[in-house]
């Protein structure tokens, strides 16, 4: 049963007697992999849910799950203002057609474009979901061009976040502090760790019987720490030549830090390092591995670590904000300094030679995720946020 929604809170869709939620997301596959549990929770709470995104193969599965899908190309690979204008026109058309009661702008590009949108209905609740900071924000030595873009980007974020009946949701303490200091100095700002995932308790940590394998699962971009991972794995193989590294994911041409064919060719020369392409069964792959590795430079709240938690698989993560929000060192996994291949190699070797500790860490991570990050804990926070008075 959906939660009762009072007519004083929302302008109800007269045709269905339901309030409407609309998600603006850059890619349909990202919505399906990272925001689907939140959307399901809103359906159960009595909302109609629509998604506007650049559409691909994932759109069919999203429709099958009961959501409306509308094409909205965000041109993620481009900074062309003409294309941005086309996206804005499309977004305004979607808003006019859908007439939502609550709008989720997911990730930075939809958020900063929202600064230019015409949202005439002042009763519409706006929720900005910050997933982490993009390449422009995170570059250590951005150069003049990206420094200017970073400045404009932050200015637009400030403008967007000043809308009436809006609230900004970040996923970790590091992002909360940054937003509070630079962007949301007076606007509502809330930290909610992720958007939920279905998790069951496991009685013991995962420990496959096969040859030891590490797994990385995600986009093949340098911002995920892949260069350091390759360097670390080369060191690990000097002492443990049979160990394997399996990488699941694809290159991302829209991201300037994407690996290229020469990067992949060089990495394969290390040996026992396999690029396996994308997978529709990420948790099966994680369960068949001994340890997940995620040495990212920056993370909002990495879902792949939650997937490892669901399997009881131990993890090695960097000290990026979102990773530290999920993992306590030597309690739920191992944390290493980002951009430090030697520290990463030592952590990987520790995992190889400590099977009992691996199982303990995997079990602890599962328990922590079940208590803190599962959908039954997180989704009600968003439903409450929607109903809260601005």
Image (tube, rainbow, N blue to C red):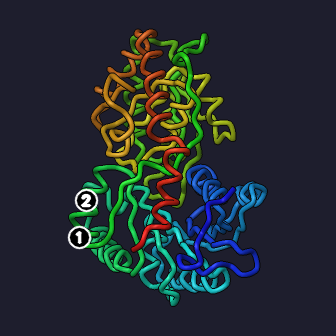
Using the rendered image of the protein, determine whether residue 336 is visible from the camera's viewpoint. Answer: yes
Say which quadrant the N terminus sits in: bottom right
Residue 157 spot, x, y in % from top left: 35, 73
Residue in front for this viewpoint, 313 or 145 = 313
Residue 146 in the image: above or below residue 114:
above
**How far is disc 1 from disc 2 in space, using C-alphas?**
10 Å
Residue 262 spot, x, y in % from top left: 51, 43
Residue in front for this viewpoint, 222 or 19 = 19
Tag 1's secondary structure?
A: loop
Mark 1 or 2, nearer chain start? 2
The residue tagged 1 is 185
Asked if the residue under mark 2 is in contact with the one under mark 1, i.e. CB atoms within 8 Å, the reply is no
Using the rendered image of the protein, determine whether residue 271 is visible from the camera's viewpoint. Answer: no
Answer left or right for 272 relative to 166: right
Q: Residue at x 56, y 65 (%)?
A: 25
For residue 168, what is the image quadrant? Answer: bottom left
Q: Residue at x 35, y 63 (%)?
A: 136
Mark 1 or 2: the one toward you: 1
Residue 34 spot, x, y in % from top left: 56, 51
Q: Residue at x 70, y 61 (%)?
A: 56
Answer left or right for 214 relative to 49: left
For residue 58, what is the image quadrant? Answer: bottom right
Answer left or right for 282 relative to 238: right
The residue tagged 2 is 178
For residue 13, what is the image quadrant? Answer: bottom right
Residue in front for this viewpoint, 265 or 49 = 49
Say which quadrant the C terminus sits in: bottom left
Q: Residue at x 55, y 15 (%)?
A: 207
Tag 2's secondary structure?
A: helix
């Amino acid at each position: 049963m959906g939660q009762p929604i009072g007519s004083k809170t929302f302008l109800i869709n007269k045709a269905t007697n339901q309030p409407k939620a609309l998600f603006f997301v850059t890619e349909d596959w990202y919505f399906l992999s990272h925001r689907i549990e939140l959307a399901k929770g809103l359906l159960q709470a009595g909302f109609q849910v629509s998604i506007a995104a650049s559409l691909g193969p994932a759109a069919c599965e999203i429709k099958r799950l009961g959501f409306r899908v509308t094409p909205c190309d965000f041109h993620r690979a481009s900074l062309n203002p003409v294309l941005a204008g086309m996206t804005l026109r499309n977004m305004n058309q979607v808003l006019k057609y859908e007439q939502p009661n609550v709008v989720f702008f997911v990730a930075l590009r939809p958020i900063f474009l929202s600064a230019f949108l015409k949202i005439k209905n002042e009763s519409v609740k706006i929720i900005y979901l910050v997933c982490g900071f993009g390449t422009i924000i995170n570059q250590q030595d951005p150069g003049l061009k990206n420094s200017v873009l970073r400045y404009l980007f932050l200015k637009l974020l400030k403008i967007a976040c000043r809308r009436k009946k809006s609230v900004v949701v970040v996923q970790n303490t590091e992002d909360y502090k940054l937003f509070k200091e630079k962007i949301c100095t007076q606007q509502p700002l809330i930290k909610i760790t992720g958007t939920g995932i279905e998790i069951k308790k496991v009685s013991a940590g995962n420990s496959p019987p096969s040859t030891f394998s590490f797994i990385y699962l995600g986009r093949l971009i340098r911002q995920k720490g892949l260069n350091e991972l390759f360097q670390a794995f080369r060191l690990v193989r000097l002492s443990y030549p049979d160990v394997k590294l399996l990488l699941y994911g694809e290159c991302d041409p829209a991201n300037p830090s994407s690996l290229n064919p020469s990067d992949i060719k060089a990495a394969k020369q290390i040996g026992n390092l396999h690029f396996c392409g994308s997978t529709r069964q990420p948790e099966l792959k994680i369960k068949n591995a001994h340890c997940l590795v995620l040495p990212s430079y920056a993370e909002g709240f990495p879902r792949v670590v939650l997937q490892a938690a669901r399997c009881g698989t131990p993890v090695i993560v960097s000290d990026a904000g979102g990773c530290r929000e999920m993992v306590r060192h030597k309690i739920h996994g191992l944390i290493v300094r980002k951009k430090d291949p030697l520290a990463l190699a030592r952590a990987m070797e520790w995992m190889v030679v400590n099977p009992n500790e691996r199982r303990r860490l995997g079990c602890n991570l599962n328990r922590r995720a079940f208590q803190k990050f599962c959908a039954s804990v997180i989704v009600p926070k968003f439903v409450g946020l929607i109903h809260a008075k601005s």
